[in-house]
Amino acid sequence: MGGFIAFLLSRATGLDLFVLVQAGYLILGLTGLVIVFAGTRRDLAGDPRRGRYLLLFLAALPLGLAGARAIPIIQDAFLAGRLTFGIVASGGLVFYGGALAVLGALRLGCPLLGLSPWPLLDAVCRYAPLGHAFGRLGCFFGGCCFGAVTHGPLGIRFPAGSPAYLQHKLDGLLPPNAVASLPVHPSQLYEALGDLALFGLLQYAGSRRHGGLPPGRMTTLYLAGYAVLRFVLEFWRGDTIRGLYYGISTSQYVALAVLAGVLVVLLRRRALAQ
């Protein structure tokens, strides 16, 4: 659908289709990042350390980009049996790797600056689902992260040249004259809606009228909530590029690891409190 909109805009404006698709993806992704930054800045209002927190957040973004590339590089190197410059220089991005890299950098960087990490981490995690929802709209516009084939009423087709079309063509699922992919689940929109629901839950949990949350709890809630959401939604994904091993995807393995880490932290806190 997003690719079809880009196609119509291309015909109307004369601009290159690929440029329009990538521009839409980039604009929506950057919008999500700006939302997270603005929300974090708002939650830290009145904190005399806000300037240093925000600078650290911006400084962590390049590490997030590296983290987003790390998972595809590892996957491609594993499949190829070696690591090459071409594997490092080309390929996609994985949100999970980027998000965990940013949060890890903030967790380690704050103590180096003499700052408690929790005001910053809790603020970032509180708005991360809202920003991510915009990012998933960008994925929908660009046609990546598409869903599994479906013949249900929610199925959508992506146009020729889209990632779904190319994968279905490679798998021999399309006739030679096909002009669109098979109908697939709009998994990008599923995740955008899930992110909005998670955002609402975090806002409710963190509201002052409900007592607020102790330091670090917002972070653990976000990590656990998104891990559950991502693990479930992966069953409706259809892009094999994300990697499938023994029936579940790379992101599902990451989600299970994150849930295990959250459980360890919660059990440790409970033990210390007794």
Image: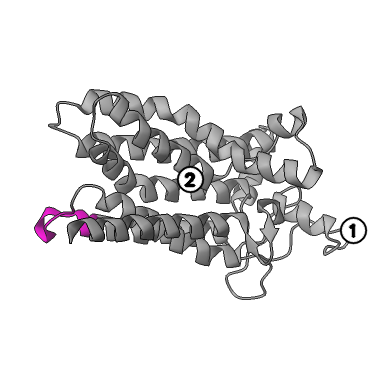
Secondary structure under tag 2 reads helix
Can you give x and y, in whole percent of width and height, for residue 121 in the image? 30, 41
Amino acid of disc 1? Pro
Q: Position of residue 56 (x, y in %)?
A: 34, 26
Expressed as whole percent of the image width and height from the top left, the position of residue 41 reads 25, 33
Can you say which quadrant of the picture contains the N terminus? bottom right
Residue numbers of the magenta segment: 203-213
Q: In the shown orientation, is residue 254 left or right of residue 92?
A: left
Q: Which mark is residue 25?
A: none
Q: Between 178 and 212, which is closer to the camera in this rendering? A: 212
Whichever of callouts 2 and 1 sits on the residue coming sooner in the sequence is 2
Q: Main secondary structure of the magenta part?
A: helix
**Can you identify the residue that label 1 sits on?**
176
Q: Residue furthest bottom?
A: 152
- Looking at the rendered structure, the number of numbered marks drawn on it comes to 2
What residue is pinned by disc 2?
A: 135
Can residue 28 be seen by looking at this rendering?
A: no
* Outermost residue to the right: 176
Q: Residue at x 25, y 53 (%)?
A: 217
Is 245 on the left-hand or right-hand side of 188? Answer: right
Query: Is disc 1 placed on a helix, strand or loop?
Result: loop
Q: Residue at x 74, y 59 (%)?
A: 181
Residue 179 position (above or below residue 115): below
Instruction: State yes or no: residue 210 in magenta.
Output: yes
Q: Is residue 247 magenta?
A: no
Front residue of 267/115: it is 267
- Location of the C terminus by quadrant is bottom left
**Mark 2 or mark 1, which is nearer to you?**
2
